[in-house]
């Protein structure tokens, strides 16, 4: 990089974890020239914590990224050790894929894809400062060696590396995930730009040698062979198994007797950790009477013998970790090869962002992933996708892009992330959205592939293929609604054999399929010509069986979309809305919401105040702008 010309890019991405790589690929696939900076090229797409990707909510995010034209789903599908569908026996809204990734292979695969991409330039270097103009327009970055790189769009995806501290017992030292070097100086540059930061923490469990586990008596959890992968591919035949064990009264007593050695009690760590993934010592503090906690034993790679103890996260001293692990069934002689630890790090207050991941007051600066105060690879990749698309569009002078909360979990996450402050990392679950019956794992393409196609990330061939599937489903639903069944002797006998209520009048065969006792293939008994495509059958059954619930949701969706379409002009003066409390006026002035829909998510606002604001926007006295 000797010439100034070679130091200029459309987009610069800082950090090459799940958020950074997704951002780099999104921008590069759209045509931007991207510089991807990483402090250590051996840490690209590193999985410093759990080797799994997916699960309820999180798996939905992965499917949505894929439907939009993102990358993480294909990375997982190329490197998984095991894949399962969780909540198979429950309703379609909460069913989700979860994969155990091979950590080493995942890193190598993603790094290879980065290196192969013609629009991505990969450089190792620690960014120590943002280059800017008048503190409201970023222009580039400076790395620790003094090199400077320039671009109109800068994406920070630094994960938990900003001013990172590794904590184990009473030890607290500088460090990032995997004992890598932290990024110390960049926080100062952010604060100098007026960006508000706060401290968060996360933790990871000890890793043990697989050969030291006694699997006898543990519940085996094999991969599923009857499902399809995140990208819809046939599942691989050879899969690794996970295993389930539990804590016991001895485990809990050990922790209770030595709880004063926990950083949570010592006070050398912030308490602002992920509430959905608490450490075992936090579980004991919060639920002192509970002896049994699940521990999943998960293989990390085929390249080495380390196993991850999901559910046994802790940063207690090493000697205490030994005792805790050895108290658990199957782990009596387990050898710890990496002790658990916590990481405390600087994070940006995400309420300073637009839903595009761009900062409100600093043009061209985007942040995504754990730097924004989220938890998990999937949330990070989702933000990376949004940031990458918008960094490209910013660099090319195009309109911003964001997703509707009624269309995707990604939209729900971004809306919540930028609207309300929180004191712990945000995690997406299926309970995060009131529209979870619409935002299902199985219909991600139907919801989002047209959007990905419009963005330019989905090929016409793929779009037409998916469109043909949706049309086939709708055609079959229409056929079911028009095919009639009479209450003749034979049909009544068939209904009796299915142990479902008889009919007294002629009805559409779709009305029979609504019944929980009747499955699609049962319709052959009544002379209906069933199709054989299992994937389409699942979609058809959901559309029919949940039709009444979906219709009710449609009314709510329409209301929410109407609020989202009530756009707030830039620099709108909320003090002109009579009846708003001064604290709410101050809150909304700071928020700079894009729409009334976003304001409706503000936790502090009263319904009466929201009604006043809706009236103000609707009566035309509040001039609207288009996105």
Image (tube, rainbow, N blue to C red):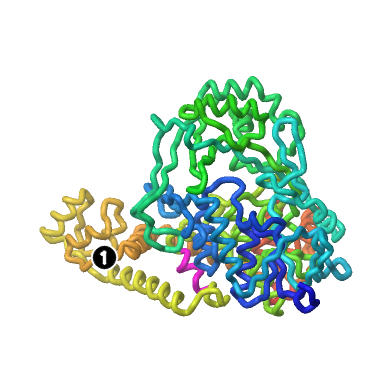
Magenta span main SS: helix
Q: Residue at x 71, y 41 (%)?
A: 272
Mark 1 neighbour class, 10 Å CA radius: few under 14, some 14 to 19, many 20 or more = few
Q: Does the magenta segment cover residue 549? A: no
Does residue 66 sit above or below 251 in this rendering? below
175 left or right of 334 in image? right
Residue toward you, 358 or 581: 358
Residue 316: image x %, image y %? Answer: 66, 30
- Residue 377 can be seen, yes or no: yes
Residue at the disc numbered 1: 532
Residue 158: image x %, image y %? Answer: 71, 56
339 left or right of 347 in image? left
Residue 601: image x %, image y %? Answer: 65, 56
321 left or right of 237 in image? right
620 left or right of 298 in image? right
Q: Which residue is drawn at 70% across and 48% down?
A: 180
Residue toward you, 168 or 306: 306
Residue toward you, 133 or 110: 110
For label 1, the SS is loop
Q: Residue at x 52, y 60 (%)?
A: 75
Residue toward you, 57 or 459: 459
**Residue that sits furthest to the left in the current view:** 489
- Residue 601 can be seen, yes or no: no
Tally of numbered tags: 1
Residues rendered magenta in the picture: 444-451
* Position of the N terminus by quadrant: bottom right
Residue 280: image x %, image y %? Answer: 60, 32
* Position of the C terminus by quadrant: bottom right
Q: Does the magenta segment cover residue 450? A: yes
């Amino acid at each position: 990089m000797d010439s100034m010309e070679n130091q200029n890019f459309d987009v610069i991405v800082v950090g090459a974890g799940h958020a950074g790589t997704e951002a780099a690929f999104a921008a590069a696939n759209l045509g931007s020239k991207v510089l991807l900076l990483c402090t250590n090229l051996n840490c690209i797409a590193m999985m410093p914590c759990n080797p799994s990707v997916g699960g309820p909510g999180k798996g939905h995010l992965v499917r949505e990224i894929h439907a939009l034209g993102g990358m993480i789903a294909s990375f997982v599908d190329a490197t998984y050790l095991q894949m399962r569908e969780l909540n198979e026996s429950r309703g379609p809204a909460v069913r989700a894929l979860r994969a155990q990734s091979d950590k080493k292979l995942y890193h190598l695969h993603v790094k290879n894809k980065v290196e192969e991409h013609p629009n991505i330039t990969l450089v190792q270097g620690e960014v120590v400062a943002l280059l800017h103009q008048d503190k409201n327009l970023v222009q580039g970055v400076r790395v620790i060696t003094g090199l400077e790189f320039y671009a109109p769009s800068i994406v920070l995806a630094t994960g938990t590396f900003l001013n990172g501290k590794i904590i184990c017992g009473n030890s607290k030292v500088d460090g990032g995930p995997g004992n890598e070097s932290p990024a110390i100086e960049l926080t100062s540059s952010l604060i100098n730009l007026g960006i508000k930061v706060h401290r968060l923490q996360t933790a990871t469990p000890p890793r043990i040698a697989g050969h030291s586990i006694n699997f006898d008596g543990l519940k085996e959890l094999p991969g599923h062979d009857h499902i399809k992968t995140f990208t819809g591919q046939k599942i691989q035949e050879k899969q690794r198994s996970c295993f389930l064990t539990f804590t016991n009264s001895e485990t809990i007593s050990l922790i209770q007797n030595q709880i004063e050695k926990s950083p949570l009690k010592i006070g050398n760590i912030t308490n602002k950790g992920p509430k959905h993934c608490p450490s075992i010592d936090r579980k004991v503090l919060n639920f002192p009477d509970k002896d049994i906690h699940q521990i999943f034993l998960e293989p990390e790679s085929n390249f080495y013998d380390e196993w991850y103890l999901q559910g046994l996260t802790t940063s207690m001293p090493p000697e205490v970790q030994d005792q805790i692990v050895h108290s658990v069934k199957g782990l009596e002689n387990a050898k710890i090869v990496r002790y658990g630890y916590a990481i405390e790090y600087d994070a940006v207050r995400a309420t300073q962002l637009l839903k595009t991941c761009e900062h409100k007051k600093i043009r061209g600066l985007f942040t995504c992933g754990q730097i924004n105060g989220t938890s998990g690879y999937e949330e990070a990749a989702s933000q990376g996708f949004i940031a990458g698309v918008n960094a490209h569009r910013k660099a090319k002078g195009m309109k911003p892009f964001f997703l509707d909360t009624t269309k995707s979990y990604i939209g729900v996450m971004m809306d919540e992330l930028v609207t309300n402050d929180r004191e712990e990392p945000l995690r997406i679950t299926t309970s995060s959205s009131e529209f979870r019956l619409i935002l299902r794992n199985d219909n991600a393409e139907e919801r989002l592939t047209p959007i990905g196609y419009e963005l330019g990330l989905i090929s016409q061939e793929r779009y037409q293929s998916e469109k043909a599937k949706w049309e086939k489903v709708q055609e079959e639903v229409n056929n079911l609604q028009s095919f009639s069944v009479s209450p003749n002797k034979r049909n009544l006998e068939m209904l009796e054999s299915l142990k479902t209520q008889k009919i007294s009048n002629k009805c559409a065969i779709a009305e029979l399929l609504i019944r929980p006792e009747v499955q699609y293939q049962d319709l052959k008994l009544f002379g209906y010509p069933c199709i054989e495509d299992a994937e389409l059958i699942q979609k058809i059954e959901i559309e029919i069986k949940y039709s009444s619930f979906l219709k009710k949701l449609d009314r709510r969706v329409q209301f929410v979309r109407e609020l989202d379409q009530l756009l707030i002009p830039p620099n709108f003066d909320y003090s002109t809305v009579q009846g708003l409390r001064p604290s709410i006026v101050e809150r909304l002035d700071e928020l700079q919401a894009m729409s009334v829909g976003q304001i409706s998510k503000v936790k502090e606002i009263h319904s009466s105040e929201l009604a006043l604001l809706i009236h103000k926007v609707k009566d035309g006295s509040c001039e609207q702008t288009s996105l």
